[in-house]
Amino acid sequence: MLLLFCIALTLALRWRCAVFSPENAGWNETVDIHKYLHLAQNPLGSFHIQPTCWRIGVPFLVSLLPMDAYAGFDLLNVCFLALTGWMIYYWIRKMEQSPVMGLLGLLTFYALGSATKLILWGVASGDSGSYLAQVVILYAIAARRDVLFAVALLVGVSFKETVALAGPLYYTMRVQTLRPDWSLLWRSVVLGLPAILVMLGIRLWIPSYNGDPAYVAQVGPHLSDVHTGVSEYTFAIGWTIVKEALGKTSAINILRMFTFGSIGIHFFLTVLGVRLKPDLLLRWSPVLVPTGLSLFAALNADRRMGSFFPFLIVCSLLAMRYLSERIRLSQEVFVLAMAVQWAALLLKRDVVILPADLALGLFLTVIGTALVTGRTAASTLQEPRQ
């Protein structure tokens, strides 16, 4: 029943999403969708523009489906996001031992438009598969299932190389002191080694030709450009392009882009969660630091902020536990608050991220209404271990 519930939530988001298609004005611009479609429609290893050419997992699965590549990516997005929500429930249960908190974690994910509806809108990418892999990895760490951890990490890096950042969490989530635990560190390295070898193998098998003028001319700018007019993919080039774009943006809009503008109510809850448990920053640093730096090398800030969703969920649950105990509201009220956030994403097909003022207003309205009506049967919430 829980999986059906997750499928229903995902299908509703997909139904109310004006997905990126040839009818969109920006279809002919430099966008990654063309690279992913090309990967799925051609033999593995025949495309050499990185980093997309190394993200072969999802395009390979699409190529096995009895439908065109565009529809295949669309279908797999729904499947992966539904499974991600389902696994979030069991991941939270392993930390919380609370079914209601598991449900709250699940809804916190689906209410985050930059991690769900934005992925559905983009259609072709490896993001939805990588999200599922990350949550399976986190579940495996919490459940102490080492083989599952190693397999999920190995498969995940074929979807997207950023999944490798979840590997060190095996150590940081389990270590008990700041002093090194050499036995645990060695075990984390051994379990992560197969995934590292897979990443290296893919790169050796599919060399990058971004800097090869002949190959760039052969495939054309539609497939070779990483940014408009630029085929090279380096942090320095990315930073130059981002710096130029930020220079044309007001300070308040930059602030919004990297905070509440991309993740709405989740930003405010996360700030409170970190204040309550500052060591979360250290435990999650293997993911937070590299992903944070990537914000300065690519223009899609909304998508990258959404990729923080596991950390946002943990912090948000901590914050809502604290609020529940502080103002004596039952945890079911917060479940309703997140369900309302999700429902608001259905209002307009062309809106993939709730405006921050609307997200905050809806959240406060639900909480305020519950306080006024006296729904204060606050049950005790258990604090997540990580």
Image (spheres, rainbow, N blue to C red):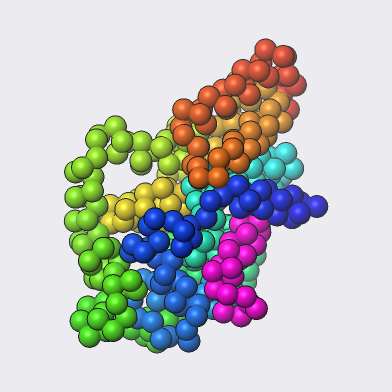
Residue 160: percent from the left, percent from the top? Answer: 46, 67
Give the residue at x 60% y 21%.
Answer: 365
Name the image quarter holding residue 69: bottom right
Give the residue at x 67% y 12%.
Answer: 372
Q: Total label count?
A: 0
Instruction: Judge from the rendering whether residue 115 lies leftward or rightward of residue 32; answer left or right.
Output: right
Range of the magenta residues? Answer: 62-86
Frontmost residue, 218 versus 22:
22
In the rendered structure, does residue 77 fall within the stretch colored magenta? yes
Give the residue at x 43% y 41%.
Answer: 262
Frontmost residue, 386 versus 131:
131
Residue 367: percent from the left, percent from the top? Answer: 62, 22
Residue 79: percent from the left, percent from the top? Answer: 65, 62
Residue 330: percent from the left, percent from the top? Answer: 71, 26
Frontmost residue, 242 versus 223:
223
Residue 154 in view in this figure:
no
